[in-house]
Image: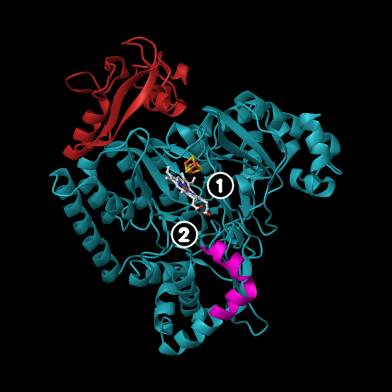
C-alpha cells in the first residue's frame, strides 16, 4: 500500500441500509467525520462481522486529510457522495463533483 | 386484467408472513446476515451502493391504475419519492429500509403485488408485449398464457433452485416488442391454417457475459400443451445445466454445448414422459384466465377522427402513438426519457398522474415496456388530446419514442454494486446533444442506444443498434462501443467496433457515428441499423477512429 494512502472504515446499517463511516467511537453518515484506521482495522472488521449489525464492513483507501477524505475508487466516491445524477439526494459531506 | 383468486392471494399472504418473520428474526440478530441474504434476495431485496434496493414484479408489464397508485405511495412513504422502471418491465426502489419492509410488503399485497422471484435462481417475472390486447398484428392476447406461466412458475418447488436465473417472454405477433430471442425461453403465439393457436418455442437466448440468440426448439406446440413442454425444457436444464461454474450456468450454455439437435431430442424425450401425466392446465382454467383478459368494451361508434392542428400534439401523435386494432382507439406510449432525465425513472407525482389518466381514459391499464417507457394501451382517439395535455404538464410527453434520445440505461455505478462504470450520465450526455432539436432526432430516425454499466448487460447493450458497455480500466471508468445489435424480430448481437473510450470520448464517438450514418444512408428512411448491416463495420470504424 503506498504510504500516502489512508484507510477508513465503512459499512451499511442493517436496519436502514444507510452508508456509514467510523468516526472513532461511533458511526456517521458523513465521510467527513471518518477517522483514519491503523493496524487495528482488521480486528475491528472481524468484530463488526461477528456483531452482525453492520453489513459489508470494509476498509477502503482514501486520499487527503481528515475531514476531507476522498476515496480512491469511483465506486466508493459514489457511495460517499450519493448518485452523481441526483444532486438533490447528495449526502452533502462529499461533493458529487469529485466522482 | 387478471385479478387474484383466493389461491393467488393466499400464496402471497403466506409468503409475506414468512418473510416478515425472517426480517424480524434478522433484526433481532437471531439469524446471521449470511443466513438472511439468500432469503432477502428471494424476496427481491438487494443491498446496493446507497441502501437496500427492492425490485417489485410487474407480471408481463401490466398494471392497473390502483397498482400504479400504490407504487407511487411506496415511493413516497418508503423511498425517496421515485422509482426506476427496468428493462424487465419491473420497478426498482433504491432507498428501502429493512425495518420498514414488513409494512411495505403489506401495502404491496393489498394490490395483488409482491417482490418474490425477482432475484435468485428461479423463474423470474414473465415479460411480454406492451401492446398486448391492443396491437393490430397479434393473433391473440399473449397475456393469458403469460399468466398461466406465472401461476405455474410461482413457487414451483422443482424450479426454485435452478442452476441460474431463468427468464421467459411471450408474444403473439411477428413484430417482436419483447426481445423473445434474447430470453431463456421465448414463446411466440401463432395461428395455423385451421385457426388453432400454438407456440413457436425459442430457447437459449440471453445477454450478459455470453450473449447468444435463442434457437427454435419446436416450431409448433399446441397452446393446450405449452406448460408441460416448458416443464420438459426446465427439467432438462435443471438436470444438466452447469452448476459448477456460474458463468456457464445459464441454459444458453447448455444448449450451445449440447447443440440444438441434441438438446431438442432430450426435451422431446422428457416431454414424451411428462405429457401423458396430465400436467397441463385443463380447458376450464384456460377459459377462466382468458375471460379475465377479455377486451374492454370498446365503443363501436368511437370517432376515428383526430384534430392535429396543435403542432406539438401532432409531433407526439406521430412519434409516440400507435394504431389500435379497434377503430376509434389508439395506443399511447409515455416516454420516461425526458430532457435531462434519468431513463426509466418516474416520480411519485408522475406515477399518480399516469394512474389517474389510465383510470379516466385508458380502461385502467398501464404497461411497462422493456425500453423503460410506459404505455396506455386503450385510449379513445377523441381523448388523446386531453391525455397529451396532462402528460405534457407532468413532463411525460417527450415525443422521442425509438429515437436517439430514447436511450436504455441500467442504474450503473450510480446505484449498482456490480457496476464498473456509470451508465446514466452517458445516456444523459448523448441525449443532451440532440434533445433540443426534435426535427433532427426525427431526421436521424429509429436509433436504439443501450447502455450497461457492466458485462451483466442489464441495459441490453448487446441488443443496441449502438451498444455501450462500461468497463474498468485501471480503476477508471471506460466504455466500449458496440454496433449492430437488435432485440427485435431481426435479432442480432452488437459487436465491438474498436478500442474503448473515456466518458467524453464515448459521447463524441456516438456523435461521429451518427454524423457518418446521415451521410452514408441509402435513403432518408434507411435506419442506422440497416445502413450498418449494408455497409458493415469498416466505414463506421473509419468514421470513429480514422
Ligand atoms: C441493481 C441491481 C442489479 C443486479 C445486482 C443485477 C444483476 C444481474 C446479473 C448478475 C446479470 C447477469 C446474469 C447472467 O448473465 O447470468 C443480469 C442480467 C440482466 N439484468 Fe440485471 N441486475 C440489476 C439490475 C437490473 C436492472 C435495473 C435491470 C433493468 C434495467 C436488469 C435487467 C437485466 C437484464 C435484461 C439482464 C440480461 C438478460 C439475461 O439475463 O440474459 N437488471 N443482472
Ligand atoms: S449491467 Fe451491471 S451495472 Fe448495470 S445494473 Fe446490471 S449489474 Fe448493475
State the residue at coordinates (59%, 62%): B326
Mark 2 or 1, nearer chain start: 2
Horizontal and vertical percent position of residue A37: 27, 20
CB at disc 1 and ligand 1 closer than 8 Å: no
User: Looking at the image, which residue sits at the far right?
Assistant: B522
Horizontal and vertical percent position of residue B542: 82, 33
Does residue B352 appear in this view? yes
Q: Is residue B7 left or right of residue B433?
A: left
- The quadrant where residue B490 appears: bottom right
Chain coloured red in this rendering: A
**Chain hosting mark 2:** B
Cα distance, mark 2 to mark 1?
Answer: 14 Å
Chain coloured cyan in this rendering: B
Frontmost residue, B161 versus B532? B161
Residue that carries the numbered disc 1 in the rendered image: B371
Frontmost residue, B501 versus B104? B501
Element assignment for label 2: helix
As drawn, the label of residue B41 is none
Majority secondary structure in the magenta region: helix
Amino acid at each position: 500500500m503506498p504510504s500516502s494512502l489512508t484507510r477508513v472504515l465503512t459499512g451499511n446499517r442493517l436496519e436502514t441500509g444507510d452508508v456509514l463511516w467510523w468516526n472513532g467511537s461511533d458511526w456517521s453518515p458523513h465521510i467527513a467525520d471518518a477517522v483514519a484506521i491503523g493496524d487495528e482495522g482488521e480486528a475491528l472488521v472481524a468484530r463488526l462481522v461477528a456483531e452482525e449489525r453492520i453489513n459489508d464492513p470494509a476498509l477502503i483507501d482514501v486520499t487527503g486529510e481528515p475531514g476531507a477524505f476522498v476515496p480512491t475508487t469511483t465506486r466508493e466516491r459514489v457511495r460517499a457522495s450519493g448518485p452523481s445524477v441526483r444532486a438533490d439526494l447528495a449526502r452533502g459531506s462529499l461533493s458529487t463533483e469529485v466522482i | 386484467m387478471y385479478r387474484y383468486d383466493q389461491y393467488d392471494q393466499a400464496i402471497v399472504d403466506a409468503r409475506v408472513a414468512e418473510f416478515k418473520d425472517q426480517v424480524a428474526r434478522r433484526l433481532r440478530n437471531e439469524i446471521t446476515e449470511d443466513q438472511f441474504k439468500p432469503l432477502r434476495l428471494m424476496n427481491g431485496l438487494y443491498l446496493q451502493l446507497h441502501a437496500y434496493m427492492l425490485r417489485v414484479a410487474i407480471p408481463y408489464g401490466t398494471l392497473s391504475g390502483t397498482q400504479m397508485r400504490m407504487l407511487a405511495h411506496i415511493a413516497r412513504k418508503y423511498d425517496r419519492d421515485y422509482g426506476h422502471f427496468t428493462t424487465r418491465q419491473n420497478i426498482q426502489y433504491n432507498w428501502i429500509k429493512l425495518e420498514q419492509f414488513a409494512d411495505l410488503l403489506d401495502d404491496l399485497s393489498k394490490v395483488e403485488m409482491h417482490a418474490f422471484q425477482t432475484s435468485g435462481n428461479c423463474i423470474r417475472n414473465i415479460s411480454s408485449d406492451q401492446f398486448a390486447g391492443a396491437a393490430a398484428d397479434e393473433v391473440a392476447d399473449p397475456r393469458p398464457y403469460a399468466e398461466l406461466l406465472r401461476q405455474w412458475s410461482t413457487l414451483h418447488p422443482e424450479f426454485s433452485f435452478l442452476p441460474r436465473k431463468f427468464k421467459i417472454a411471450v408474444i403473439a405477433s411477428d413484430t417482436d416488442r419483447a426481445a423473445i430471442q434474447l430470453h431463456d425461453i421465448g414463446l411466440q403465439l401463432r395461428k395455423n391454417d385451421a385457426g388453432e393457436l400454438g407456440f413457436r418455442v425459442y430457447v437459449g437466448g440471453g445477454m450478459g457475459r455470453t450473449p447468444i440468440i435463442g434457437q427454435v426448439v419446436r416450431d409448433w406446440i399446441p397452446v393446450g400443451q405449452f406448460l408441460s413442454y416448458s416443464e420438459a425444457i426446465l427439467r432438462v436444464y435443471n438436470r444438466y445445466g452447469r452448476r459448477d461454474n456460474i458463468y456457464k450456468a445459464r441454459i444458453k450454455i447448455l444448449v450451445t454445448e449440447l447443440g440444438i439437435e441434441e438438446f431438442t431430442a432430450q426435451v422431446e424425450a422428457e416431454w414424451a414422459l411428462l405429457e401423458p401425466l396430465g400436467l397441463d392446465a385443463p380447458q376450464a382454467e384456460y377459459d377462466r384466465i382468458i375471460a379475465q383478459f377479455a377486451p374492454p368494451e370498446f365503443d363501436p361508434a368511437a370517432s376515428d377522427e383526430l384534430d392535429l392542428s396543435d403542432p406539438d400534439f401532432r409531433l407526439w401523435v406521430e412519434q409516440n402513438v400507435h394504431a389500435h386494432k379497434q377503430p376509434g382507439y389508439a395506443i399511447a406510449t409515455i416516454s420516461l426519457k425526458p430532457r435531462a432525465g434519468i431513463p426509466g425513472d418516474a416520480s411519485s407525482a408522475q406515477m399518480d398522474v399516469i394512474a389517474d389518466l389510465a383510470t379516466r381514459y385508458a380502461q385502467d391499464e398501464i404497461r411497462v415496456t422493456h425500453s423503460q417507457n410506459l404505455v396506455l394501451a386503450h385510449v379513445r382517439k377523441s381523448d388523446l388530446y386531453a391525455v397529451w395535455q396532462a402528460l405534457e404538464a407532468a413532463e411525460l410527453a417527450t415525443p422521442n419514442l425509438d429515437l436517439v434520445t430514447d436511450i436504455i440505461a441500467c442504474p450503473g455505478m450510480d446505484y449498482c454494486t456490480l457496476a464498473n462504470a456509470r451508465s446514466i450520465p452517458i445516456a444523459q450526455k448523448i441525449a443532451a446533444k440532440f434533445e433540443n432539436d426534435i426535427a433532427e432526432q426525427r431526421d436521424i430516425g429509429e436509433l436504439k442506444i443501450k447502455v450497461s454499466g457492466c458485462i451483466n448487460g442489464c441495459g441490453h447493450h448487446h441488443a443496441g443498434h449502438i451498444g455501450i458497455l462500461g468497463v474498468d480500466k485501471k480503476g477508471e471508468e471506460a466504455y466500449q462501443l458496440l454496433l449492430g445489435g437488435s432485440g427485435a424480430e431481426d435479432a442480432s448481437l452488437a459487436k465491438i467496433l474498436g478500442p474503448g473510450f473515456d466518458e467524453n470520448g464515448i459521447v463524441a464517438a456516438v456523435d461521429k457515428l451518427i454524423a457518418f450514418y446521415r451521410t452514408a444512408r441509402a435513403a432518408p428512411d434507411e435506419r442506422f441499423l440497416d445502413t450498418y448491416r449494408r455497409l458493415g463495420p469498416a466505414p463506421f470504424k473509419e468514421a470513429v477512429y480514422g
